[in-house]
Image (cartoon, helix red, strand yellow):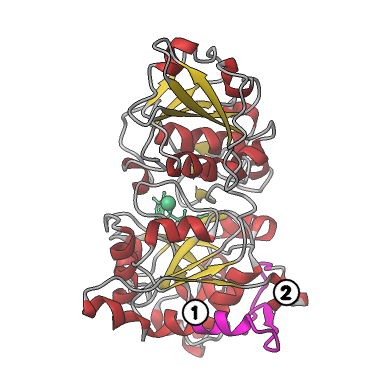
């Protein structure tokens, strides 16, 4: 199997990108994952007459039998998946990413039924949603009985109704005799659960028949991948299979919420806004439980937040939206030995920050950056790679990680980034949250 093949041989394994056309997967009529969902069979149909279906089946088989994780697309970012119930498989994720193992992983499910099975102590995990005769013979008050009937904490009911499948991860209580591998939770008594909104992701979980633990499929500390090529760049030779479903629609990771704390809290900003959450019953007082690195040194609540994150090799210089744009002097002070700098623009900065109007006709074809040339004070050429992410927070989120990766691949010494107002909404907050973590320096003048 792919698993042992390469590792025991001590040489890097071949990493294949398998392109799967979206038309292979059809969401069935019952695909809306309501809280009433008791569907055990799943919500997607796979068209086996399509050649690409075989790729999904192969990936599912690897997930079931091998300890080498499989990369797959979700609507947020690409994930690196393993069977969440097998320790050796989950350890494979940490190995491939070179990620510290005290950082918990998100568990991806394809139905609410599958989540319920994870929340019930093992003795009730028999695929049935009925009360056993033993349970019902005991007198319990209404509240307790409800909990036996539905192990999903009721605070999450409106969120599941409204946002699943989608970019929302909810912190769930992990039962003592949980079927989840202990490496998934990194020793915590909770786990994060998410039902992704990508048909290919849902199909893969369904075919594997197990919940999938999956962090973002980047090497630890690097920007999250939003294309299959990004994954290959980071994990080439470390994994066997990348399922390619095209570029991710959202571009930043899911919102993580904790409804087990009082008041409930947002642990990581993502695609679901604070206002949208506040409209849900029980979430009127939801608080912001994350801190951007630039703002505080306090101990983080979500364990992933204490590590360096989302960082390209080049230094990221983040200009908060309130500060003026970098001057020629500042820009040229960071050219480095490659004589190349990068600029990522959003709302107001002009092309190449008006350093140069000479657009090189040798502009790179393999990305979206435009290439300008400018002479520095000693008469030497400097290349300015300029990327415009546009005005909308959604567009900026979609292009952000890709922009950082593209400029890195072109060996710029520093990347100047025009920040946006994080009070514009949660997608803007998510963008600024990721940028503050990746930045060497935040400019706030
Ligand atoms: O969009 C996403 O969420 C992507 C795609 C692949 O689904 N996944 C992702 O996973 O971003 P990862 O492992 O890179 O991020 C997990 C985040 C971390 O910030 C971690 O600390 C938090 O979720 N987390 C996971 N389990 C937790 C728990 N039990 N308590 C608190 N935070 C938790
Ligand atoms: Mg990540």
Residue 54: x %, y % from top left: 58, 85
User: Which numbered circle lies on residue 51?
Assistant: none
Q: Is residue 445 visible?
A: no
Q: Residues within 10 Å of mark 2 (few under 14, many from 20)?
A: few
Q: Is residue 218 visible?
A: yes
Task: Tell me, yes or no, whether the highlighted magenta stretch contains residue 195.
Answer: no
Compare residues 37 and 165 and report the one nearer the observer. Answer: 165
Which quarter of the figure is the N terminus placed in? bottom left
Q: CA distance from mark 2 to mark 1?
A: 17 Å
Residue 317 higher or lower than 187, as above or below: above
Answer with mark 2 or mark 1, whichever residue precedes in sequence: 2
Compare residues 409 and 57 and report the one nearer the observer. Answer: 409
Q: Which residue is located at x 54 percent, y 84 percent?
A: 57
User: Which numbered circle lies on residue 23?
Assistant: 2
Residue 134 higher or lower than 233, as above or below: below
User: Which numbered circle lies on residue 59?
Assistant: 1
- Secondary structure of residue under mark 2: helix
Q: Is residue 42 left or right of residue 227?
A: right
Residue 26: x %, y % from top left: 73, 76
Residue 383: x %, y % from top left: 49, 28
Asked if ligand 1 lies within 8 A of label 1, the reply is no
Task: Tell me, yes or no, whether the highlighted magenta stretch contains residue 38.
Answer: yes
Q: Quadrant of residue 330?
A: top left
The magenta-colored residue range is 33-58
Residue 252: x %, y % from top left: 55, 47
Compare residues 298 and 245 and report the one nearer the observer. Answer: 245
Residue 368 higher or lower than 358, as above or below: below
């Amino acid at each position: 199997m792919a698993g042992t093949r390469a590792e025991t041989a001590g040489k890097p394994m071949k990493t294949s990108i398998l392109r799967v056309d979206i038309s292979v997967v059809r969401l069935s009529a019952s695909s809306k994952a309501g809280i009433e969902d008791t569907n055990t069979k799943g919500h997607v149909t796979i068209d086996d007459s399509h050649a690409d279906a075989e790729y999904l089946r192969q990936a599912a088989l690897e997930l079931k039998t091998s300890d080498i994780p499989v990369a797959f697309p979700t609507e947020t970012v690409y994930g690196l998946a393993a069977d969440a119930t097998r320790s050796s498989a989950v350890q494979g994720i940490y190995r491939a990413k070179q990620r510290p193992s005290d950082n918990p992983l998100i568990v991806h499910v394809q139905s609410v039924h599958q989540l319920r099975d994870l929340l019930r102590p093992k003795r009730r995990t028999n695929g049935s949603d009925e009360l056993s005769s033993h349970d019902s013979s005991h007198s319990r008050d209404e509240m307790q009985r409800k909990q036996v009937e539905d192990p999903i904490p009721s605070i999450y009911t409106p969120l599941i109704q409204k946002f699943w499948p989608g970019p929302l991860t909810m912190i769930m209580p992990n039962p003592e005799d949980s079927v989840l591998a202990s490496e998934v939770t990194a020793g915590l008594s909770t786990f994060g659960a998410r039902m992704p909104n990508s048909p290919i992701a849902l199909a893969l979980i369904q075919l594997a028949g197990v919940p999938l633990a999956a962090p973002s499929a980047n090497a630890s500390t690097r920007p999250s991948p939003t294309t299959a090529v990004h994954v290959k760049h980071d994990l080439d030779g470390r994994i066997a299979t990348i399922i390619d479903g095209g570029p991710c629609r959202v571009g930043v990771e899911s919102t993580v919420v904790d409804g087990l704390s009082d008041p409930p809290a947002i642990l990581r900003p993502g695609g679901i806004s604070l206002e949208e959450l506040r409209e849900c019953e029980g979430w009127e007082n939801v608080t912001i439980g994350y801190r951007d690195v630039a703002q505080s040194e306090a101990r983080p609540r979500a364990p992933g937040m204490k590590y360096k994150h989302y960082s390209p090799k080049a230094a990221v210089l983040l200009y908060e939206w309130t500060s003026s744009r970098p001057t020629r002097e500042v820009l040229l002070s960071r050219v480095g030995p490659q004589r190349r700098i990068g600029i990522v623009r959003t709302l107001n900065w002009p092309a190449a920050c008006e350093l140069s109007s000479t657009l090189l006709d040798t502009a790179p074809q393999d990305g979206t950056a435009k290439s300008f040339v400018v002479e520095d004070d000693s008469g030497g050429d400097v290349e300015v790679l300029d990327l415009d992410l546009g005005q909308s927070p959604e567009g900026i989120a979609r292009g952000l990680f890709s922009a950082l990766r593209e400029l890195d691949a072109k060996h710029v010494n520093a990347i100047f980034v025009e920040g946006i107002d994080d009070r514009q909404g949660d997608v803007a907050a998510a963008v600024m949250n990721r940028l503050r973590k990746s930045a060497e320096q935040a400019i706030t003048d």
